[in-house]
Amino acid sequence: MWQVRIHQLVKIILAIATFAWACECAASYRFVTLEELARDSEIVVMVKQERKNTEAPRMPDKSQHVIVRAFKGGSVGAEILMCPQRDSEAYDFTDGPALFVLFAKKNGQCFQPIAGRRGVVEIEGEQAYTVNFLDEPNWQALSDFIQKTEKEVLRTSKKGKAKAKTKISPTN
């Protein structure tokens, strides 16, 4: 009888410990808002992955992208270089889709997404993958996301909180 109760008690303790660990993991993941990303980014651009890297001998772990739409701090046709990221929050630009919206800051000669992978919105077809955003659906129409992004960049810029410091032109 005691063995059964001890066995049940151990199961309960393990269940509580597992639940506590799961809650801690969930609490450490922080969703972001479009407002935060627009306000805190130096550049907000839609970029197309350049599969070939002409800088490969000098910078093999950096990936190159072409801006196809600029919301803040960039010019269409300009190339940007993404910094290598090696932490658990890193977005793998070499393995992702060919098109995405990037919320980033300059870090030396390259750019790095703010808020880790949450600063990268994948585009597939006519859909934007916004699962990491607070109060947004997992997927939404690309046209809706573009409209929201333009509105938020304009709104945060008008408040004076998001002055574009970084200009990227096609000649850079």
Image (cartoon, grey):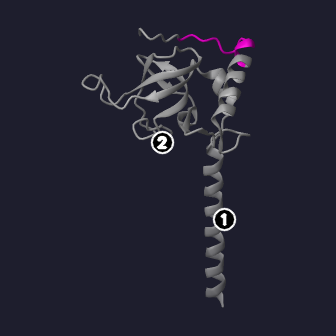
Label 2, label 1: how many angstroms apart (C-alpha)? 26 Å
Q: Report the residue at 47% width, 37% height from top.
A: 90
* Label disc, if present, on residue 88 of the rendered structure: 2
Instruction: Name the amino acid, label 1.
Output: Ile
Dot 1 alpha-carbon crowd within 10 angstroms: few under 14, some 14 to 19, many 20 or more: few
Membership of 164 in magenta stretch: yes
Residue 16: image tag: 1
Q: Where is residue 150 shown, x and y percent of the image?
A: 68, 22
Q: Tell me, yes or no, whether the two marked residues, 2 and 1, touch with CB atoms within 8 Å.
A: no
Q: Position of residue 37 (x, y in %)?
A: 64, 27
Q: Residue at x 68, y 30 (%)?
A: 34
Q: Quadrant of the C terminus?
A: top left
Q: Quadrant of the N terminus?
A: bottom right
Front disc: 2 or 1:
2
* Label whose residue precedes the other's in the sequence (2 or 1): 1
Q: Residue at x 48, y 37 (%)?
A: 91
**In-image side of 24 versus 58 (left or right):** right
Magenta stretch? Answer: 156-166
Question: Three-letter amino acid code at disc 2?
Answer: Ser
Give residue 81's position: percent from left, percent from top: 41, 22
Residue 79 visible in the snapshot = yes
Decide if residue 33 is in sight here.
no
Q: Is residue 65 magenta?
A: no
Crowd around label 2: few <14 · some 14–19 · many ≥20 (10 Å): few
Query: Front-most of 125 and 101?
Result: 125
